[in-house]
Image (tube, rainbow, N blue to C red):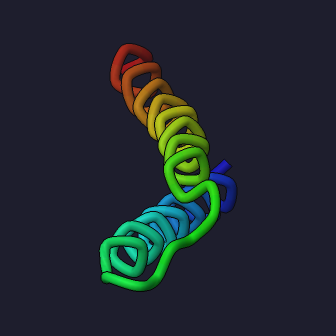
Amino acid sequence: MEKIKKISKYILNVLSAIAFLITGINAVDGISIPYAHQIIEIIAVINGFISSYLLCQKVSKKRGK
């Protein structure tokens, strides 16, 4: 279970960094990333899912004590 949490945290950080890069590069004049808005929205949904999983694990662990 700890390994899944650790991998989830790394995935969350990597996806967040990718979203920041896409947003930053897309904001530069003359550079346009196709479907950047949709990509960022998908990353946000995945991040929300992973975050809720990690939060639920934390809450269920505290309730069990």
Q: Is residue 41 left or right of residue 4?
A: left
Q: Residue at x 47, y 24 (%)?
A: 56
Q: Is residue 16 left or right of residue 38?
A: left
Residue 14 screen position, x and y as percent? 53, 72
Q: Residue at x 67, y 61 (%)?
A: 3
Q: Is residue 10 left or right of residue 30?
A: right
Q: Residue at x 50, y 49 (%)?
A: 37
Residue 32 screen position, x and y as percent? 51, 74
Say if 34 sits above or below 65 in the image.
below
Q: Is residue 39 left or right of residue 20?
A: right
Residue in front for this viewpoint, 11 or 23: 23
Residue 2 screen position, x and y as percent? 61, 55
| Residue 2 visible to the viewer | no
Say if 33 sits above or below 58 in the image.
below
Say if 19 sits above or below 61 in the image.
below
| Residue 30 visible to the viewer | yes
Residue in front for this viewpoint, 63 or 21: 21
Say if 61 sits above or below 13 in the image.
above
* Extreme residue toward the top, this view: 63
